[in-house]
Image (cartoon, grey):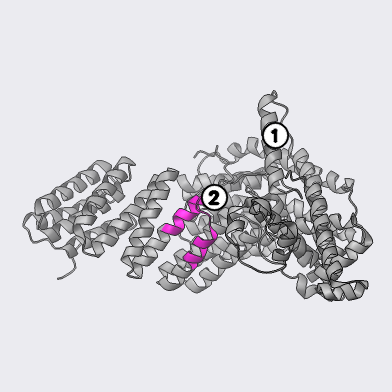
């Protein structure tokens, strides 16, 4: 028999309709899809214009992937699931080991890693639950939505970063309105000012966050 | 407030972002305003989450130890795989009955790389010689289960592939045991959902074979949910269509219709065109079974057109064939006949002779209803010639059935029911070459 084919795309469960999965690897990160697409185009052009280089080894690939996605994965584990940072790093390692062994092409690497990170984080707390008490809101962390997790966490991470650039008063205003859900009138009372001014402040602060957010994600407007 | 050129200003967009209002005409048309609104919504949503406000600093720097470990693991895998690729042909020398014995005499084959190479060889082997594929998985398991350094993922993958190979060869009970072993191994890993979802799809297939439809539907659905979480669109679509297929097999047409409509509404015709086409084709079939013929024809024609645009001619033909069947079932013989003739031409062109015979007999059945016995008899003769030329294990019994039908057509005593009997027999005889043919008593 011929064993020369080593097509990993057709694996056991992928074949019920006899279709091979044609999946596309794409670069990922906190940056927006627009930026990613633009980068990809540039990269593709560079590849076609330069002589063939030595192919990157699997080790180089995984290192590049780790560096690209580590911040987001750490954010998911340490912030979203409140796992201590050193344990989070171990979970990131485990997630990458699983990724390397999937034996199939993954079409959205970032989404895969983020979903696997959530999976590993829940596993972590289940294991911890046997020996120590869980965080109060463990229930909330069981299933943080089911779709677009990577984008959601990436946005949160970027907004978190953007907030650091704001003056204290602006951060406080946004916290009161968007996190605590207070009305402009409530915010005005808290800040001892008029409703009209509070509303203006909320709008201006949000506009500022958006500007910083767009700068971080480098979207050309 | 709208400003010049009728764009929204930021204050208006911020107000809109905090209200759940539907898109107005301008927002629908203006991508700039829509994107600005979407960004405000995303930011507002992020700020409603406590995590965003956590001020505890996180280390930015990648950890050198993690990098070193991952590089080491990837390098080891690459070296093992390269070595295994060299050794694999030596392990698989001779008939498959010898392979296990060769493995027992050569410890150098016992590596994780060899397990991966054996598993990579399974899909091709399934196409050529399924029993070889089953043996390949036996070798992979023998190595993985006895290899101290094997990871749970490696063992789980070996057992999952075995389950599929056993399912493929009809050993559903063996496949089910293999699935349990696969799940047991994957459960040891901390990031196992994706692998378990893949096991779930095989489980759905196996349970379909065991006619445990309710449970199979549950597994397909759970796998689809997990694939969606991992944004694996292709596997998500396969799992959802597997669920639909199970609903159709178990005659739950209403539920299948609901699931298909929901799926169609989530897909984009341009971006997910292949899945979209399959959903349309299934919707057509489902509507046919729900006696909604006009809708069925609409969906099947749309599916055929889409598959044609995509160059998936076999699926386009399948959709057109089903559309012809809908028309035939409606009694619209004059509409059905040209469509069926086109199907026969198309499947003959692609060399699918069994399908060509099946479609021809469907034409013969309609011709009998119109009294066109001569043409029906010609169809019998062509079908017999096809079987004579193909010289299959079941050629003789197939010829017998067709000869009986031809005789009845020639003497003008043939009925549509007789043609149906022959069609059904020709469907079954490839799997049961010793099956005898007889017309059902009238």
From the viewer's perspective, is residue A28 above or below residue A203?
A: above
From the viewer's perspective, is residue B175 above or below residue B394?
A: below
B346 vs A126, left or right, is left
For the point 71% across and 62% down, the residue is: B12
* Secondary structure beneath label 2: loop
Observer able to see residue A96: yes
Observer able to see residue B435: no
x and y percent of residue B336 in the render? 23, 56
Q: Of helix, strand and loop, which mostly describes the magenta segment?
A: helix
The front one of A34 and A58 is A34
C-alpha separation, residue under disc 2 versus residue under disc 1 = 23 Å
Q: Which mark is residue B271?
A: 2
In the rendered image, residue B277 lying in the magenta stretch gets the answer yes
Which class describes the residues within 10 Å of circle 2: few (<14), some (14-19), or many (20+)? Answer: few
In the rendered image, residue B231 lying in the magenta stretch gets the answer no
x and y percent of residue B209 in the render? 46, 65
x and y percent of residue B183 in the render? 64, 64
Quarter where residue B23 is shown: bottom right
B76 vs A4, left or right, is right
From the viewer's perspective, is residue A189 above or below residue B332?
A: below
x and y percent of residue B399 in the render? 20, 51
What residue is pinned by disc 1? Answer: A42
Report the chain holding disc 2: B
Report the chain holding disc 1: A
Q: Quadrant of the N terminus of chain B?
A: bottom right
* Secondary structure beneath label 1: helix
Residue pushed farthest left? B411
- Read off the magenta span: B259-280
Residue pushed farthest top? A51
């Amino acid at each position: 028999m011929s064993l020369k084919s080593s097509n990993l795309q057709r694996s056991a469960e992928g074949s019920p309709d006899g279709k091979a999965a044609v999946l596309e690897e794409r670069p990922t990160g906190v940056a927006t899809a627009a930026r990613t697409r633009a980068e990809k185009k540039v990269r593709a052009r560079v590849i076609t214009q330069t002589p063939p280089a030595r192919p990157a080894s699997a080790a180089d690939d995984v290192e590049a992937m780790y560096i690209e996605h580590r911040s987001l994965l750490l954010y998911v584990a340490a912030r979203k699931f409140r796992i201590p940072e050193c344990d989070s790093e171990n979970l990131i390692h485990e997630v990458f080991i699983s990724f390397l062994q999937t034996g199939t092409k993954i079409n959205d690497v970032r989404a895969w890693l983020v979903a696997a990170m959530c999976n590993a984080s829940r596993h972590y707390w289940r294991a911890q639950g046997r020996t120590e008490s869980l965080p109060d809101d463990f229930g909330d962390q069981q299933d943080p939505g089911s779709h677009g997790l990577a984008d959601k966490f990436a946005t949160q991470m970027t907004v978190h970063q953007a907030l650091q650039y704001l003056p204290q008063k602006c951060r406080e205003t946004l916290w009161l309105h968007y996190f605590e859900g207070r009305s402009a009138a409530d915010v005005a009372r808290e800040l001892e000012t008029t409703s009209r001014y509070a509303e203006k402040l909320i709008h201006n602060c949000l506009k500022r966050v958006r500007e910083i957010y767009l700068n971080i994600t480098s979207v050309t407007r | 407030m709208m400003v010049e050129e009728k764009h929204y200003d930021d204050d208006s967009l911020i107000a809109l972002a905090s209200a759940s209002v539907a898109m107005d005409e301008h927002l629908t048309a203006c991508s700039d305003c829509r994107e600005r609104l979407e960004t405000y919504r995303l930011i507002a949503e992020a700020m409603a989450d406590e995590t965003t406000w956590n001020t505890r600093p996180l280390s930015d720097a990648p950890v050198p130890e993690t990098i070193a470990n991952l590089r080491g693991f990837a390098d080891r895998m690459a070296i093992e795989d390269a070595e295994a690729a060299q050794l694999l042909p030596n392990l698989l020398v001779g008939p498959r009955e010898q392979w296990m014995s060769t493995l027992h005499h050569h410890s150098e084959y016992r590596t994780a790389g060899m397990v991966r190479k054996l598993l990579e060889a399974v899909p091709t082997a399934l196409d050529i010689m399924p029993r070889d594929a089953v043996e390949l998985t036996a070798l992979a398991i023998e190595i993985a289960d006895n290899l101290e350094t094997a990871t749970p993922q490696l063992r789980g993958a070996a057992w999952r592939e075995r389950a599929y190979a056993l399912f493929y060869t009809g050993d559903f009970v063996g496949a089910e045991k293999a699935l349990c072993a696969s799940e047991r191994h994957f459960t040891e890993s901390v990031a196992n959902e994706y692998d378990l979802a893949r096991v779930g799809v095989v489980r759905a297939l196996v349970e379909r074979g065991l006619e445990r439809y309710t449970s199979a539907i549950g597994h397909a659905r759970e796998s689809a949910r997990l694939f969606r979480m991992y944004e694996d669109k292709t596997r998500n679509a396969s799992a959802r269509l597997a669920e639909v297929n199970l609903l159709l097999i178990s005659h739950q047409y209403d539920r299948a219709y609901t699931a298909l409509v929901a799926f169609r509404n989530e897909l984009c015709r341009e971006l997910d065109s292949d899945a979209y086409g399959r959903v349309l084709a299934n919707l057509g079939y489902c509507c046919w079974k729900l006696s909604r013929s006009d809708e069925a024809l609409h969906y099947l024609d749309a599916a055929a057109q889409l598959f044609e645009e995509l160059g998936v001619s076999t699926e386009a033909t399948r959709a057109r064939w089903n559309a012809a069947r809908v028309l035939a079932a409606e009694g619209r013989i004059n509409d059905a006949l040209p469509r069926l003739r086109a199907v026969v031409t198309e499947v003959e062109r692609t060399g699918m002779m069994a399908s060509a015979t099946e479609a021809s007999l469907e034409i013969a059945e309609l011709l009998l209803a119109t009294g066109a016995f001569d043409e029906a008899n010609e169809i019998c003769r062509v079908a017999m010639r096809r079987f004579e030329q193909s010289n299959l294990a079941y050629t003789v019994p197939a010829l017998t059935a067709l000869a009986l039908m031809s005789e009845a057509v020639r003497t003008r005593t043939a009925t549509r029911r007789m043609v149906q009997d022959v069609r059904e027999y020709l469907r079954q005889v490839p799997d049961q070459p010793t099956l005898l043919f007889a017309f059902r008593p009238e």
